[in-house]
Every structure is written in structure tokens, then in C-alpha cells.
Image (cartoon, coloured by chain):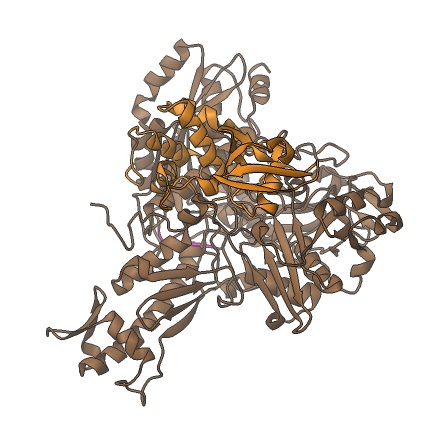
Chain colours: A brown, B orange
Amino acid sequence: MPKDGGIGASSKRREDVRFLTGEGNYTDDINIRGQAHVFFLRSDVAHGALKGVDTSDAAGMPGVIRIFTGADFEAVGGMPCGWQVTDKHGQPMQEPRHPILAHEKVRHVGEPIAAVVAETLEQARDAAEAISVDIDELPAVVDMKAAVASDDVKVHDDLTSNLCYDWGFVEENKAATDAAFEKAAHVTTLELVNNRLVANPMEPRVAVGDYARGTDDHTLYTTSQNPHVIRLLMGAFVLGIPEHKLRVVAPDVGGGFGTKIFHYQEEAFVTFAAKACNRPVKWTSSRSEAFMSDAHGRDHVTKIELALDAQNNFTAVRTETFANMGAYLSTFAPSVPTWLHGTLMAGNYKTPLVYVNVKAVFTNTVPVDAYRGAGRPEATFQLERVIDKAARELNVDPVELRRQNFIREFPYATPVAVEYDTGDYDATMDKVLEISDREGFAARRAESEAKGKLRGFGINCFIEACGIAPSNLVGQLGARAGLYESATVRVNATGGLVVMTGSHSHGQGHETAFPQVVAEMIGIDESMIEVVHGDTATAPMGMGTYGSRSIAVGGSAMVRATEKIIAKAKKIASHLLEASEGDIELKDGAFSVAGTDKSVAWGDVTLAAYVPHNYPLEDIEPGLEETAFYDPSNFTYPAGAYSCEVEVDPATGEVTIERFASADDFGNVINPMIVEGQVHGGIAQGIGQALLENCAYDENGQLLSASYMDYTMPRADNLPPMDHYVVDHSCQTPCTHNPLGVKGCGEAGAIGSPPTVINAIIDALQSGGHKVDHIDMPATPSRVWSAIHG
Amino acid sequence: MRIDMVVNGKEAGGEVEGRTVLSSFLRDQLALTGCHVGCDTSQCGACVVHVDGQAVKSCTMLAAEAAGSEITTIEGMANADGSLNVIQQAFQDHHGLQCGFCTPGMVMSAAALLKENPKPSEAEVRDYLEGNICRCTGYHNIVKAIMAASGQDVVPVAAE
């Protein structure tokens, strides 16, 4: 029987009402009296020496307030990087300066060169066209291997090479791993590309800077997943504004998917310019600008090798990956191919030896950083593709080869430095085989073949590390931030609660799901609880939402704060009931004395806290408000098994997804409806990566896919039909180290689905006698047709 | 130039430049910020409104072209008592939205579809949504919401 409230209920989302009636408050909906607009003139070449920027004609154009160039920012800091990776020789990564506006050189198409502040956006844009930019175009380097092989074209003249770092993990395992390959009965090798993607939240980025001269207070409204992180980075490292004079507000945010984690130049610019011009300054990205200024995702080129013994046990995994950083280091870019990728290379398997090498490379392209899954999709894609290839080479069932190598004892310390607390990979595999009706596949394949089509069944497992992250651990790994989360729970006199969380909701439904937890703990109705987030002036210092961390870390902080509230409320109740505190029980919103019929309602206790007439003032303070900071002791490890059936038209190479099934283990689930929605969204992005999406550059560094005309977003008819699409989360091994037993569900779909789709396509092609071992993503009709026709 | 029109049943108007698009006029002058702009190539559909009963991408129509028309935006879709209309309610019931940014355009397109085709098949719904991009939901629950709004049986949320 489904619950109608509290933990485990599919409570309808309260935020929907404002979104469905046009009453949302997104950053672009914010207009401040006296506001000016900025338009950024961006580089149209990928690499060049910036000889001069002549703004004299533009400065006199109608409505122009001021034009800024790189020279205006010499006195302020560059864009900071939040994670320092140490290379395999123990040396820090190469870290280039990243100016707010280009200075001396431009290094990617889209890099801002000048900024025109004018009365209207149209006037700013008109004036930008009158700016004369003198650039000596230089050869660009786009291909990562070429960038490493030669220093002929250096992205940064003051660095020793285009190599950001050469990382080995675990370096101490390298010799033993190499030796295992020498002894292997079978080695499967695969070279693959994890295609470059653009996150494309439907709301483009927006930033509005405001400045109050009378009080010297700065406010930034911005489309961010983590306003406190922006306040710290921009205040302390870029503009030198102390946090108590800087407020950052991220109101309703129209999707993030990682790309709204990072601190961007435009945020620093509008904050700086609002003071310099003494006017509020607004920037609204166009979609075309978004393609060349939002941090991109993925873009790895990898060689992976899997060693097996004569009994088909995995004995070692060895990889070499080139990871594109783009022209500059975006906020968390260095962590993605290393700590979010190398640590997952054991997957769901008890492979005793793993060695991961990653070369992070500067190129004349937009910076690359975390995108939904961040490193974990790349790890999963390599591992699951090479296992599928090994199964084919060894002529064994890909399901059985995986099962044979599953980890079955927990906790399990992997050879890549993480310890899985819990899991049951057989359970999710059993479940996905059941819900996908693998039994019926042969008949369906025969039907497809009768129509001249090829049908394939793909299976895939994955594990991810979420609930990011233990601060002391990530500090050792190079993070320049802690990764705890915070919550303040404020109980009002009449019993209602406000939860102020450092997590940020930009589609995840925190305003609905978080109250379900508190309602369950106290035994009151969810409608009595309100969530406030997204404003540094109201929420305690928090690290924001990414890495499937909100309920696991932010939710845990909320639980801890609520526990403090309940503990204090029990003291008050014991006074009111004239009973010992140890005898007080809280159930269904009332405090009672164990074994008696004496009780006092929640609202009477909260009223007493604020109207303390009959109150133990000598022992406890009035009021009922508590804050907790929660720092997790480990990552969480959601895992699952996915399956996909595709039909391939050999005449055209077109692939259609006929059936899809996912069996996820997220531990405990707070709101199943929201969880399933997250999985649907992640799978759509994964299918998009596998079949449709590709961010392409030409050899000169020109961005070829800079609009929705050229970058293929998944649309409604690209996804599996309702009747053959099952999303399951009934296999639950609760997380052992957070109070809710939750693992996080935001990224799973995007991690688990790409290899599932490609495995299914290869299965289809092989069934038609086509000896195709691999197709790089996106598996477009032209790529599939070319693979079939050699 | 001066333009006048009827928006959500009320007279509305203002001064615009020849180059002002309808979405900008609705957002900037009439403060109807439920009309969202998600791209600049007429692809995403977040800005869909109804002009004289037709679904139109308001980023691709000049405000001046809409002079004299009757416009309906997402702000005009709820029932007279302010409650969600049947399509909006179906989107909430079936979790057909997450971040909410594409939602106004989805609801306006869905309304136009159901006017033309009161009982669309799943394939017809998916085909009709070609011009509306959603990045959050994977469309599954949007399609379901539209089918449900048309009175057809669908599997309820979180029971599949």
C-alpha cells in the first residue's frame, strides 16, 4: 500500500504550481530599477595574439555607459580552480591564469574580449559591433594527442607544455598490474572515445549584479547550483569582497546538470561592473553564447585493457586516457578525470589490480568540467564496453561473465582507494533480466529479422561514488573546499518549520522531498514544513547540489538539525508534563509520558519555546532553532544493472530504442515519483550521448555544433516507448553510514545507459554477421551504416 | 511604434521597436515572465504562446505582427478560480516537470495538440512535441501527462 505522506510517499511536488502557472522566479525574471545590460564581445578565432581592442567608435554609440576590456581587470584575480591534482611524479598540475576578459591572447572561440554596458541589450549589442579587435590569428591545437606530442602550438606560453598533468593511479599498483597482463590467459583491448557533450540546461545562464553605494553591499543573482561556493570563490579569490558584504542568490534555476556548479567570468563581471558603473548590470546568455561559454563535458580518449585468467576471472585492468581540459581550468575540471573516474575503475567487479593513467591536456577549446555523472560515465563506458567485447571474444554470455566477477562481500575495499559499504549486484542483475523479459528476446529478434531489421540486447552494470564527500579525504586529494552540507531548522511559535538548506534545488524537488523527512521524524503534516534555499543571506554556508549529494549529505544535515530540535523539544515537554526527560516519547506530533495517557501537542511545545512563561529558563534557552553541518564519513555507492533492446535498420544505419529497463539500488528512497523522474532524465541524457549528441570542433578550433540546429538534443520521439520502458528501484541495500540510508539517484541514468545502448547495437550488428567490435558515440545512422558496410 | 492586443483576456499594449520579438514584448513590457526563452534558433519551444488560437514560438514572431491579435500565455491557462486546469493538473499528477523552464511551452503545446486531436496516440504526442525540448524529464512523464489530460488511461506514477 503506497504511503500518503512522509518517507517513501510519492508526494506531489509543491513547486509545480508556480512553474505550471508561469509564476516561477528565474534569474532572467529579475529586473532591478535602473538596470543596465551587458553584451560580451567574444573571440571568433580559437587562438590568437590580442594586439589591440579599439573601443573609441563604440564608446560614443547611443546608450553606451562603459566598455570594459582585459586591461580593466589587471588589478583583480583570475578565475580560480577549486581542485589541484598532483601528477604521478608528485608534482602539482600546471595551472594557467584565467582572466575575466581576454588579455594578450585569446585561447578559444567564445572567450570574452570586451564587455559593453549600455542602457538596453540592443544598444550594447549594436555598440559591440563597432568595436575593432586586432588579433593575429595563430594555429590552434584541438586534438589532444597532437597537443601532447608537440609543443609547436602551446595554448599557454608560460606553461612548459600543453600537459596539465600526467596522473597515475594507483602508481604503486603499476608494476603488479603490468605483471598480471604478462601472465594473463586472455587480454581484451579496446580504444574508445567518450564524446564531448554540452550540458544544455534549458535555462541559459544569467547573472545580475547589484551594488549599494551607501552600504558597500554587493548582490549577485545567478543561475547557480551552489550560491555559497560562488560567494566564496568570487569574493575571496577574484574580486576581494568579504563574504559579509557579498550576497549571492540563486533563485529558481532551470536545470544545471553540472554546468551551473562552476564560477564563470560573467558572474564576476556583473558584480564588478555594478560597482564600477554604480548601476545594476544584467547579462542573459543566448543559447549560441551558452554553447561557447558553458563548460562542456566528457571528451576522453581511452585505451583500456582487461586481463583474464583461464577461468575467465578478471585479473587486471589497465587504462590510458587523454582528458580534454579545454583552454583553461574550469572550477572543478581537474578532479573529473582523476578522483571521479579513476576511483571507479574497479566497477562492480573483484578485479584485484587496476592501474589508471590520465593525461589532462590543454587545447584551444571551451573549458571542460563536470557534466551529469562526471568521470563515472567515462569509467563505466570503458569498463562495460571492454567486458562485453571480452565476452564475445571468449564466447561466453556477457551476463554470466559479469556475474562471475561480481563483488559479493561488503564492505569491499577496491584496489582504487574506495571502500564500497554495501550493495547486491546479483539482485539488480536478476531484476533487470526479469523486467526486460530477456526470455522473450529471441522471439522479438526473429520478428525484427522478418522485417529486414537487426535486433540487439545490451546489458550493463555500473557503480558510482556519490554523496560527495568526506572533507578530510577530498582535502588530501587536492580539493580546495570542504564538501559537507548544512541545514538550519527554524521552528516557529505556532509549530510550522522552515528548513534552510545549503543544498540547491534546480529541478530535483527538494521543496517537496525534504519536508517528507522532517514530517516523518516529528509526525506532522508535510505542509507544515517549508524549504528555503538558494540565498546566502538566509541559508547557512553550504556546498550546493551536484554529485547526487543533496539527500545523502544535505538531507543528513537536515536530519541532524531536526534531531537537535526534537531533543530540545523533549526537554520542554518534560517540563510541561512534569515528567523525566527520559520518559518522553514523540509520536504523531505529540509528546507523551511513556506508559501514561499524559501528553502535550507539538504546537504547545513550540509555543512554549517562544512564549516561555511556564518554561525551564534556568536550564534551557527559549526559542527552537538548530543548525547542523554534516560531513559524510564515506561516499555512497549507488549501483545497478540496465538493459536495452535496439532495432537497427541495416539499409540506413538508423537505430531505434525498442525497450529499456533499469534496476537501480539507491538504498532507501524518500519520494519514488521524484526518483523515477530523475532516472528518466538521466537515461534520456545517456541515450542522447549514445545516439545523438556530439560537440564538434574543426581542426581550426571552430565550434561546429553551436546551436540546436547542429547539436542534436534528444526529443520526445527519440526515447523508449512507455509500454516497454521500466524503471525499477526496488533492490535496496541501504547506505550504512548516513542516517537516512540513502545513496542518491541524480546521475545513475546518465552513467548506466550509454554503454547499455552501444552494447545492444553491437549485439544487433553481430547478429547480422557484421564483425563490428565497437562504434564510437554518438552512434549516428552514418556511423552505424559505415560500420556495417565496412 | 505603438501596438495593442488582447492578452489573457485583457487589453494590453505598448511601444516597441520594429525588431522587438513577441517574447521580449511579453516578458519585458507586460511582465509575463512565464514565457521563457531557451534558444535563439526557434528550436526549444519554451516560448510557445497561443496567437489567435494557434501555437506560436513567440521568439520567432515580431511583436508588431501580433498587433490586434488575441494572445494566451501560460499565465492565462489556469481555471477561473485560479486552480490548475486539466493539463496543468495532469503535469503535476504525473511529474511531467522538474526544473520548470520548458514547462510553459510544453503546456501551451499540449493544449494546442489536444484542441486539434482530443485523443492522441502516444506516437502522435511524441511527434507533436518535436518542437519542444525538455532536458530534465526524458519526456516520459510529459507524454504520460498529456495522455492523461486527454482522458486516456495511463499507469500512475511510481507504480510501474
User: Could you tell whether B42 is left or right of A277 in the image?
Assistant: left
Q: Is residue A458 magenta?
A: no
Front-lying residue, B91 or B75: B75
Residue B126 in which image quadrant: top left
Horizontal and vertical percent position of residue A319: 57, 41
Rendered-image quadrant of the N terminus of chain A? top left
Horizontal and vertical percent position of residue A478: 60, 60
Main SS of the magenta part reads: loop
Q: Is residue A419 magenta?
A: yes
Front-lying residue, A629 or A185: A629
User: Could you tell whether A617 is left or right of A686 in the image?
Assistant: left
Task: Say if residue A26 shows up in the picture.
Answer: yes
Q: Which residues are magenta?
A: A418-422
> Residue at position x 65%, y 62% from top?
A210
Front-lying residue, A9 or A404: A9
> Residue at position x 30%, y 22% from top?
A440
> Residue at position x 29%, y 43% from top?
A730
Query: Residue lying farthest left?
Result: A596
Decide: is A188 above or below A117. Answer: above
